[in-house]
């Protein structure tokens, strides 16, 4: 598995997570020290998952027999869990956000494999939606390729990561994953490849109960970050071509308006920059939306990973917001020339305004950093 970590290192949004994994593997002292903690966590997790599963099974059997109208309209059957889709594009902070959403024991975290492993599927919205549905319903055994290539090395969900480090054989079976996934009250899936309109059929599907977290980043920042990726990180033409990128943002903006109107409680917009500037406020909002308890553990995690005070964490933190996140939010302006920014603004101005980002009108404005002065137009 460590071989996978070094070669196929680039996931949809993170190229830095895999090397981290490798580092932690080659550091035996800290692993040894963590063993009792891992065991305890694991025992807790297994017990808790089994209980959840039993409750759900018991609940659904009882309900099926005794009371017919679980749902008043009689068409919807009882769902084992709810689903949260983290809908985003690459280099937009979704590794961090996904990690934050899957901190507690109530979630199970998956990734859509479409961008990296099945890119062509992304062009067929119907087929992609059907595939996503299987992931949302934890049907991993129907997609063994997905399971083998993808899940096993993506350790965003620490619960699964510890489990696999502790007992690799458990992680070689899709059924283990299905059991853990089904036991979790909330399944979180990160979606990177697809335009937001692909979400609409999932909302209309009676077997699902999905919500969408639409995570966006200033396209100038996202493009700047994509341009600084190493060459082995595969970037698709539509992810680096400015006019194509702006078009994707534009389409998503239109889909967002539809979702807001038709399913107001199922859609939330989160901006990378707000997350970086006010991590706790934004994550509280996210947790409430997802129906997850915001615990002191989450709060501590956020502080450790965004305050910039935990220098020890910087080196082995697998996400981009691990430093002083206030500074990270608009660091792209140091890397991108005014001319490059102008070229993007030319194509993206409506999009920037639609998402509430500042459009710079002069070189002076661009180089000025005035905190609150950069108010959305
Ligand atoms: C970007 O895509 C557009 C079509 O969307 C095309 O006309 C243009 O040549 C592309 N630019 C580059 C640099 O490839
Ligand atoms: C983080 O960056 C902001 C903005 O540059 C600064 O005001 C703050 O003091 C920094 N925090 C730490 C802990 O360095
Ligand atoms: C196991 C159990 O409780 N079965 C009951 C299901 O409901 C029918 C009536 O609808 C009963 O006859 C069964 O005993």
Image (tube, grey):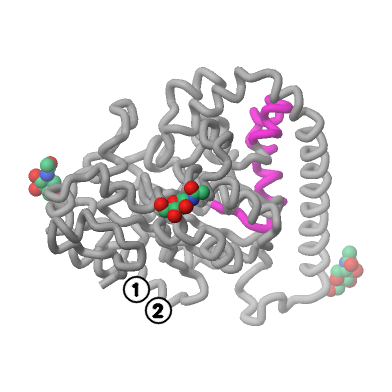
Instruction: Identify the magenta region.
Output: 161-188
**Where in the figure is residue 298, as x and y percent of width and height?**
65, 54
The answer to whether 326 is drawn above or below residue 290 in the figure is above
Dominant SS in magenta = helix
Tell me where residue 75 sits by quadrant.
Answer: bottom right
The answer to whether 266 is drawn above or below residue 241 in the figure is below
Q: Is residue 5 magenta?
A: no
Whether residue 218 is visible: yes
Q: Residue at x 25, y 65 (%)?
A: 358
Q: Residue at x 63, y 57 (%)?
A: 186
Q: Are marks 1 and 2 in contact (CB under 8 Å)?
A: yes
Label 2 sits on residue: 261
**10 Å neighbourhood of mark 1: few (<14), some, or many (≥20)?**
few
Left or right: residue 376 versus residue 75 is: left
Label 1 sits on residue: 257
Quarter holding the C terminus is: bottom left
Q: Residue at x 38, y 53 (%)?
A: 329
Q: Residue at x 56, y 60 (%)?
A: 280
Instruction: Please tell me which residue lies in front, 87 or 95.
Output: 95
Q: Say what secondary structure mark 1 lies in.
A: helix
Where's ligand 3: which quadrant? bottom right
């Amino acid at each position: 598995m460590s071989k996978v970590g070094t070669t196929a290192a680039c996931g949809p949004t993170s190229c830095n997570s895999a090397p981290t994994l490798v580092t932690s593997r080659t550091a035996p002292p800290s692993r040894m020290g963590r063993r009792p903690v891992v065991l305890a966590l694991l025992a807790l997790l297994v017990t808790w998952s089994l209980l959840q599963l039993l409750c759900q099974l018991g609940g659904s059997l009882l309900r099926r027999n005794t009371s017919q109208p679980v749902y008043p309209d009689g068409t919807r059957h009882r769902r084992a869990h709810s689903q949260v889709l983290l809908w985003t594009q690459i280099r937009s902070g979704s590794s961090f956000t996904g990690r934050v959403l899957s901190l507690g024991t109530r979630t199970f975290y998956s990734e859509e494999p479409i961008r990296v492993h099945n890119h062509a599927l992304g062009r067929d919205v119907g087929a992609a939606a059907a595939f996503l549905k299987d992931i949302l319903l934890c049907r991993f055994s129907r997609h063994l390729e997905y399971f083998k290539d993808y899940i096993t090395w993506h350790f965003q969900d620490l619960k699964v990561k510890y489990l696999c480090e502790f007992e690799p054989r458990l992680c070689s079976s899709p059924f283990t994953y299905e059991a853990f996934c089904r036991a979790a009250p909330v399944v979180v899936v990160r979606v990177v490849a697809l335009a937001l309109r692909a979400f609409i059929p999932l909302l209309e599907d009676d077997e699902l109960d999905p919500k969408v977290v639409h995570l966006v980043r200033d396209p100038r920042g996202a493009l700047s970050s994509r341009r600084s990726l190493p060459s082995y990180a595969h970037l698709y033409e539509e992810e680096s071509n400015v006019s194509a990128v702006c078009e994707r943002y534009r389409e998503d903006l239109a889909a967002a308006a539809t979702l807001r109107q038709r399913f107001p409680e199922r859609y939330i917009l989160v901006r990378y920059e707000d997350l970086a500037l006010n991590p706790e406020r934004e994550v509280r909002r996210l947790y409430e939306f997802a129906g997850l308890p915001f615990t002191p553990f989450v709060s501590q995690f956020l502080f450790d990973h965004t305050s910039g005070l935990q220098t020890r964490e910087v080196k082995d933190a697998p996400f981009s917001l691990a430093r002083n996140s206030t500074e990270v939010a608009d660091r792209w302006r140091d890397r991108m020339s005014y001319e490059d920014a102008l070229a993007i603004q030319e194509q993206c101005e409506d999009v920037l305004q639609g998402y509430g980002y500042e459009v710079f009108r002069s070189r002076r404005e661009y180089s000025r950093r005035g905190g609150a002065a950069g108010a959305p137009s």
